[in-house]
Structures are given as structure tokens and as C-alpha cells.
Image (cartoon, rainbow, N blue to C red):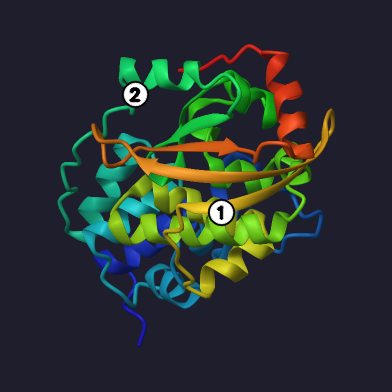
Amino acid sequence: MSSEHGTPAAELGEFLKARRAALSPAAVGLPETGSARRVPGLRREEVAQLAVMSVDYYTRLEQGRLQASASILAVLARALRLDEDQQAYMYRLAGKTPAKRRRQRAQRVTPSMRRLLDQLTEAPAMVLGRRLDIVAWNAGAAALYTDFARYADAERNYVRLLFVDPVMRELHADWENAARTAAATLRMEAARYPDDPQLASLVGELSVRDADFRTWWATHQVTSTSNATKHYRHPLVGELHLDCDTWVSPEDPDQRILILTAAPDTPSHDALKILTSWNTPANHL
């Protein structure tokens, strides 16, 4: 049964509805579909996907039929791009106190890890942090993949680039397998950090922008695979079949170094040697 108009739950629902109506898809990084919208702003299902919750659950919140928890409010605040005053108002309507979140320090590699990356002159290598953010990389990784420095910090995420960047998508000869594995690895990250709002925001964005990600995420497949063979189709040197090995950093368990190599006396080894010999500058962190 719906709550009576004027109750805090109903007022919260009206507030959520108003904020949803005030946001365009472009404002939250979603592509315009071109189809006519019956209501202004975002659709309920788009907000639900951005907030990583079911459409039914979000609908009941808007209708004032549910009491929202503090953790749900935190996710909605990010999905609806609320400023500080709007967040305070939303929490007050819900009768909740916003949790004091510890600010996550930006991840940086140690000087010794930086030296290791730079000394791997014939092997592309990068350091992945929380949420599979790309924390650092060497010249070989820039030559193989792309110049990661051209992305904003918030966009420099391995899974995100794999799904939304055409260059990264085209590079992977077996894109579907690579993307499925990346989504399953991100699932493991979500289990480790269930209250990470940045991870929830990333999952929400990809769920709306990519139908494959949305489908694979819903299957709850997980993996922690650290060794694999990756297949690339590079525009300059052609096909590459590279062994990928991953190790957890001894200084920071949230960082892992990924190194790509090719077996000696193979076409991939020769092609990789040519690619890395050009020594593309790495604008690394």
C-alpha cells in the first residue's frame, strides 16, 4: 500500500522523482538512444541501473513504499549527482545520518615498483589497483594498448576501457572472452568491497551503456585467474599471442602487476620486440 502524501517516505519519493527528471542521460554519462521520452530526464530503469538495484526496488522508493537504508541513500546520491545540500536534505527526509566515509587515498606505486616497470623494456606491464583502475604502466603497455594518460583519472579503468573504448575493443582479437573475464574479475572486487560507491557507480554506468556487460554481470560469474594467454590484433605489428602473468604487490594487496610476454622464437616474440623497440613514451603516474 502506498504511503499517504506528506509523510517523510512520500516526500523522499517526490524528491527522487524530481532529481531524476532534472538529469539528462548525457549528464550522467549515458548515451542518447534517440527514442522519444515520455517523461523528462532519466527513466526509472536508468536510475536503478546506475544505482545497481532492481527497477522494482527503486520504484517502491519513489512511491514512498519503502524505507531507504543509509547505504542505499549513499548509492542514490552518486547515481543522481546530488550536491552536499541535496544529500543532507535526502538523508533528513529518510531520517538517516550519512555515514562518515573514510576518504580513499589515491593509489600510487612505490619507487621500486616504478623502477621495475621501467626496466621491463621488452614486456608491456601495468599496475592495476582497486576496481581494476590503471594505476601505472610502462612504455610497452602504452605501445601495446593506448596512451592511458589521455584519459581522466576517473576514466582510467581497465574494465571500463575494455567495454566503452573502441580502440581497446578492436585491439582484443577475442574480445568477448576478455570482456567476460574482466566482468567476472570485477565481480570478485565487488565481493571484497561491497560498500565501495565508486565501484557501484562504475557497475551502474557499464550496465546502462553496454548490454553485454549487463547480461554477464547478472550471471554472477566470478574469477581470480592470474595467468592466461591474451590474443591481440595490433594495428602496427599484427597478431600477438602473449602470456599474461599477474602478481599481487607485497607492499599493497590492492595492487597487482600485470606483465605480458611472448615465448622465444615465435612470431609474437618478434612482433613484440619490434613494438617495444620503438619505445613509445609512457606518460605514467
Residue at horizontal 55%, vertical 45%?
Answer: 244
Number of labels in the image equals 2
Give the position of the C terminus as an image quadrant.
Answer: top left
Residue 136 visible, this angle:
yes
Quadrant in the rendering for residue 152: top right
Give the position of the N terminus as an image quadrant.
Answer: bottom left
Residue wearing tag 1: 228
Which amino acid, mark 1? Ala
Residue at horizontal 45%, vertical 52%?
Answer: 226
| Disc nearest the viewer among 2 and 1 | 1
| Label 2: element kind | loop
Residue 194 visible, this angle:
no
Which amino acid, mark 2? Arg
Image coordinates of residue 187 in percent, x first then y, are 43, 61
Image position of 125 with respect to 64: above or below: above
Image position of 115 with respect to 151: above or below: above
Residue at horizontal 49%, vertical 16%?
Answer: 118
As drawn, is 32 to the left or to the right of 235?
left
Residue wearing tag 2: 108
Image coordinates of residue 4 in percent, x first then y, are 31, 77
Q: CA distance from mark 2 to mark 1?
A: 26 Å
| Label 1: element kind | strand
As drawn, is 239 to the left or to the right of 249?
right
Q: Earlier in the sequence, mark 2 or mark 1?
A: 2
Image position of 252 with respect to 2: above or below: above
Quadrant in the rendering for residue 11: bottom left
| Residue closest to the eye, 153 or 124 | 124
Image coordinates of residue 170 in percent, x first then y, are 78, 44
Image coordinates of residue 164 in percent, x first then y, are 67, 45
Q: Which mark is residue 107?
A: none
Residue at horizontal 38%, vertical 42%?
Answer: 247
